[in-house]
Amino acid sequence: MGLRLYEEPKLNKPVLIACWPGIGNIGIMAVDILRRTVGAEELGEIEPWDFFYPRKVLIRDGELKDLEFPVNRFYFKKTEKKDLLFFIGEEQPTDGTGAYAEGTKAYKMANLVLDMALKFGCRRVYTSGAAVAPIHHTVRSRVWVVPNSADLIGEVKSYENTVLMSDIEGRGGQGNITGLNGLLLGVAKKRGLEAICVMGEIPIYIHGFPIPYPKGSKAVLEVLSAALDIEVPMDEINALVQQSETEIESVYERLPSEIKEQLDKLKYVTYARPSEPGPITEEDKKRILQEIDKFFKKEPGGD
Amino acid sequence: MSERQPFKLFIKPELEGSPLVVAWNQDAGGVGQKVAAYLNKELASREFAEIAPENFFALSGVSVEDDIAQFPESKFYWCQGKNLAIFKSDIPRYQWYKFLSLVLDIAEKYCKVKEIYTVGGMVSPGAHTIPRMLLSVTNSTETKQTLRQYDLISDMDYETQDGQRPTFSSFLLWAAKRRNIAGVSLWVPVPFYLLAFGDPWACKKIMEFFDRRFDLNINFAGIDDEITKQDREIAQVRSQISELDSYISKLESNLGLTVEESEKLVKELEEWLRRRH
């Protein structure tokens, strides 16, 4: 079980931006755009066979030619401002049957990622994921930020369009970040590295569907580009946002009017500070979700 | 994670450069399980090692199959006097590569293994009266060459489709290749309506290959009896239920069945054969 390096560049205290797939592929889409924007080069990988079941076999003329595993690759970029390390995993390792990392494999992978980061002198890590929130798909996603040290609170508060867990109504600063995007934060803390997880909001009624949510990714991308002082052209993500909105709207239009009316109320919900009584109650929320669930379990196409 | 030794060695086998036959308990028609059991019985095999289940299987309870509580097993057998080893195992739920590495470690250390053969069934839409073929996938061109004189279909092209994943046998072949161990997967088609009952003919096809390849001198009388019995029972069904006979006749003429016809054939044949057993 190990790391494989393609080359050993000299990097100056690089910042690591690590991401695995998760809800709406929010984090990974943002990090991948960032990686391509800066033109990061391949640096190495984590050998996958200890972590994953292979996903593809290639047999030609009765001979096993190749067995393909999910790729977990590091990239690097030296810049005038700061050096960057990227880690992008195609799948989260798990000891169980869930889609999100758990157990010894996840812990080992988190440590391997940090082994690589520390090898190049990294002291700061960003991870990214999704925050499921009672928002409407037409509103701008905000970014929930969670640092692994109280020293970073001031800094993360200064990022535009972000909220802390304590800003979120009813949470009292508590929460849970599932999977490796969260676990890495904890392992980094254990190993003495600063880490911040940035999570783009995804509407509560969309998060269960296996579709990307570029609007959440855009919000994450904005925060990361500001935090890292990297100028990122937004054309690509804007096009993806537009395309996804059209697709979501076409499904939304087919929803029964009573459900749509309920969901429309989410446009006006303020669940994060300053908290004000919103027009939607917890009971409303529960009923909306149940009805939506029922709707999507019907024949494709709905009513 | 347990600190226990990951396997138990019951006895040191006297094996030198022996081939290892690998059979998984989960495969189409139970071919692997049956082949391993038959070889173990006929060749008077002796259990020599066992992989401990705790790191590889969910041990939160037991599963029940056909009314019987199951427990995962991963055992190595030594066919005394034949220089052949057999590994019969459930497919692990976790730590697949670690599990395969352990299998190869044991095979290298105690069998000095040079060749590994996995056996398994694959679902076939054909009739049971059509002679079984034996398909092979090797992990190197050299291995393929060494098997040229056998009657194997060895020109398969295959690529995993979306939503599917490679077989565990493919994973083992790949892992073996990393250690320069020759690997062969043997597959025999099992008619879809025999999946619940097993296909002794398919099992015999694989064992005939091993018999020739390793000069095992296997007594096939037992499996021949099973083939005769099953053929006779299906012939009786055909003579009594004309609809099922017409379905099987269609398959014998290489004509496909509709989903409804296939389901009916499976269900009614299963009910009939269960009543007989």
Image (cartoon, rainbow, N blue to C red):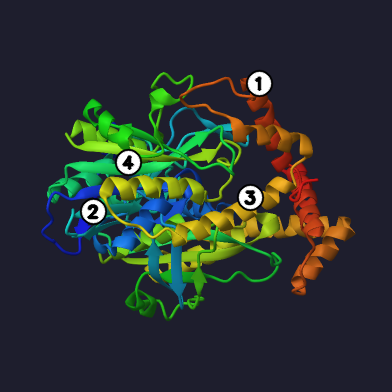
Q: Quadrant of residue B191?
A: bottom right
Q: Residues within 10 Å of mark 1 (few under 14, many from 20)?
A: few
Amino acid type of the residue tagged 2 in the rendering: Leu
Amino acid type, mark 4: Lys
Label 4 Cα neighbours within 10 Å, binned few <14 / some 14-19 / many ≥20: many
Residue at which label 4 appears: A105
Tell me the SS state at disc 2: strand
The disc label shown at residue A85, or none: 2
The spot of residue A286 in percent (x, y) is 64, 26
Closest to the observer: A89 or B135?
A: A89
C-alpha separation, residue under disc 2 versus residue under disc 3: 34 Å
Instruction: Give the amino acid at mark 1.
Output: Glu
Q: Secondary structure at mark 3?
A: helix
Question: Which mark sits nearer the N-terminus, 2 or 1?
Answer: 2
Q: Residue at x 28, y 55 (%)?
A: A47
CA–CA distance in space, label 4 to label 2: 22 Å
At a point 73% along the width and 35% down the height, the residue shown is A261
Left-right relation of A252 to B3: right
Which badge, 3 or 4, comes first in the chain's sequence? Answer: 4
Q: For mark 1, what is the residue?
A: A283
Dividing the picture into quadrants, the one containing residue A203 is: top right
Q: Which residue is mark 3?
A: A248
Relative height, residue A284 to residue A135 (above, below): above
